[in-house]
Image (cartoon, helix red, strand yellow):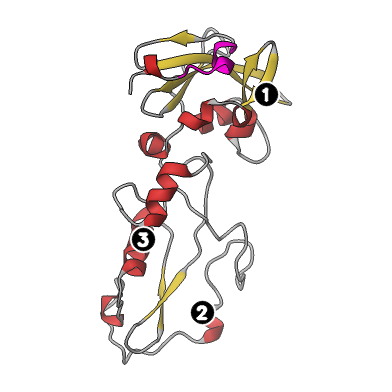
């Protein structure tokens, strides 16, 4: 869909610095740091759902085509990373966070995946277990990289997963199961025996959801998830 048939909301027309091009619109944006004040940028929103920002904080700044996360970091904003709340646009001389504007409805994870690569925030995934359909023993899956997350994801989708399918070592159902005390340690960086917290349990990100997967979980995330 061309940009000329999109971005027609009245709120967008009131945004400072609005510029319309055939495949994107551009508006002035900013991020405020207690130490450095306002860092000003130009937010480009493409018809395919990609968000990129050129920084104009000083005449000598050469930072361009940044992800919103990188722009937030570049501004010196301290505290938790949440660019949808910290980056703002100007409407009638008032700073409005992106999450309160219509702009985020155009954001698409699939279009931003290549530029973000899960850098939006450092998300930790604890180890997970899958039970063998034959012997009922639980086997551990590491979740530190995108590749490991995909291995677990595909194994979870398998209708009758078995021990012989475990990707790390060649084992069968005769191999011993981890002790329960060992299984309670799943790698949480906050607490070794954590039973699940906001630090180690991810509800969906570009590291553990996949645009080439047709399962309902991945499809729903790519289509509907809020930007992080």
Q: Is residue 69 magenta?
A: no
Q: Marks 1/2: CA distance?
A: 44 Å
| Mark 1 or mark 3: whose residue is earlier in sequence | 1
Secondary structure under the numbered disc 3 in the rendered image:
helix
Q: Are marks 1 and 3 in contact (CB under 8 Å)?
A: no
At x 68%, y 11%, the residue is 92
Local packing at callout 1 (Cα closer than 10 Å; few below 14, some 14-19, many 20+) is some
Quick one: SS at disc 2? helix
CA gap, disc 2 and disc 3:
18 Å
Where, by quadrant of the figure, is residue 117 drawn?
A: top left
Q: Residue 148, which numbered label?
A: 3
Q: What residue is disc 2 on?
A: 183
Q: Residue 13 in magenta?
A: yes
What is the span of residues highlighted in magenta in the rendered image?
A: 7-15
Q: Earlier in the sequence, mark 1 or mark 2?
A: 1
For the point 69% across and 21% down, the residue is 36
Q: Residue at x 48, y 52 (%)?
A: 204
Residue labelled with disc 1: 32
Relative to 155, does residue 202 appear above or below in the rendering? Answer: above
In the rendered image, residue 148, in percent from the top left (x then y), is placed at 36, 61
Distance (Cα) linking label 1 and label 3: 37 Å
């Amino acid at each position: 869909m061309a940009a000329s048939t999109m971005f027609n909301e009245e709120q967008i027309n009131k945004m400072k610095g609005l510029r319309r091009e055939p495949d994107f619109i551009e508006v002035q944006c900013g991020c405020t740091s207690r130490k450095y004040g306002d860092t000003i940028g130009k937010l480009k929103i493409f018809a395919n759902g990609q968000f990129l920002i050129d920084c104009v904080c000083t005449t000598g700044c050469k930072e361009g085509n940044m992800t919103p996360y990188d722009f937030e970091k570049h501004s010196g904003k301290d505290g938790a990373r949440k660019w949808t709340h910290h980056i703002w646009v100007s409407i009638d001389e008032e700073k409005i966070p992106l999450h309160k504007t219509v702009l985020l409805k155009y954001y698409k994870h699939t279009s931003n995946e290549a530029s973000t690569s899960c850098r939006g925030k450092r998300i930790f995934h604890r180890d997970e277990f899958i039970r063998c359909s034959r012997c009922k023993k639980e086997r551990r899956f590491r979740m530190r990289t995108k590749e490991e997350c995909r291995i677990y994801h595909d194994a979870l989708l398998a209708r009758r997963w078995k021990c012989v399918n475990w990707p790390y070592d060649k084992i069968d159902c005769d191999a011993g199961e981890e002790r329960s005390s060992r299984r309670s340690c799943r790698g949480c960086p906050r607490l070794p025996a954590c039973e699940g917290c906001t630090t180690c349990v991810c509800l969906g990100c570009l590291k553990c959801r996949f645009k080439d997967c047709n399962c309902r979980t991945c499809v729903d995330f790519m289509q509907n998830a809020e930007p992080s």
